[in-house]
Amino acid sequence: MQALVICGSRNRDGQTAQAAAALAQGLADQGVGAQVVFLPELQVERCRQCDADGWGLCRTQGRCTIADDFESLRQRLRRADRAVFATPVYFADLSESMRAFLDRLRRVCRSEEDRTGMADKPVVGIAVAGGGGGGAPQAVLRLEQILSRCGFDVVDMVPVRRQNLTLKTGVLRLTGAWLAHCAPPE
């Protein structure tokens, strides 16, 4: 079994990376390999809204015309048995790199056929807020909405504040162990 952890943070040693690593460790403790991908290190452009009506091949063919790392990451996500989306919180919202990836993903996941390999896949979302930490609940809500629209089985959302990061890393490790055995709905 394999899990893919998609991290929207640039800082490999930052708070979001620590939270993602704790969940990945929980998966590893149960024998599940977890590959971590840092979105800002990839070339993932924002949606161009190709056509005059604001769509493109995403609407008609379930694919994107932009030649960057999006499609290869989408294929890795399809092959994974579990997925985790971890984002830092900026302005009570997702990071720009996570937003760019998910904006395009939800466009290519419009039909059941386009959701192949993602529909009902168990996923966990993590939103880590620095500063006062007040934006984490809004960010996990937005993340859950997008992931659900893509067809994932969102099994947990974990808001984290810098003030409770130590506590939440323990919770996330347990969440990872639980996710390793979480079965998709029948």
Image (cartoon, helix red, strand yellow):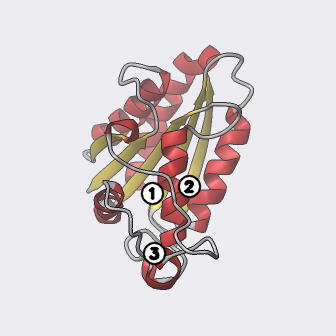
Badge 2: residue crowd in 10 Å (few <14, some 14–19, many ≥20): some
Measured as percent of width and height from the top left, residue 29 is found at 30, 37
The answer to whether any part of residue 161 appears in the image is: yes
- Residue under the image location 72 percent in, 37 percent down: 137
Q: Is residue 181 left or right of residue 29?
A: right
Q: Nearer the viewer, residue 175 or 62?
A: 62
Alpha carbon distance from label 1 to label 3: 20 Å
* Kind of element beneath mark 3: helix
Camera-near label (1 vs 3) is 3
Q: The residue under label 1 is which amino acid type?
A: Cys
**In the rendered image, the vertical position of residue 169 relative to residue 52, given as above or below:** above
Residue 90, given in percent of the width and then of the height, sits at 63, 30
Answer yes or no: is residue 30 visible.
Answer: no
Q: Amino acid at mark 3?
A: Arg
What whole-number distance in Å separates the C-alpha atoms at marks 3 and 2?
17 Å
Which residue position is annotated with label 3? Answer: 115
Q: Is residue 9 left or right of residue 37?
A: right
Q: Are marks 1 and 2 in contact (CB under 8 Å)?
A: yes
* Residue where numbered disc 2 is placed: 155
| Crowding at mark 1 (Cα within 10 Å: few <14, some 14-19, many 20+) | some
**Badge 3 or badge 2: first in the primary sequence:** 3
Give the answer, above or below, for where 136 lies relative to 81.
Answer: above
The residue under label 1 is 182
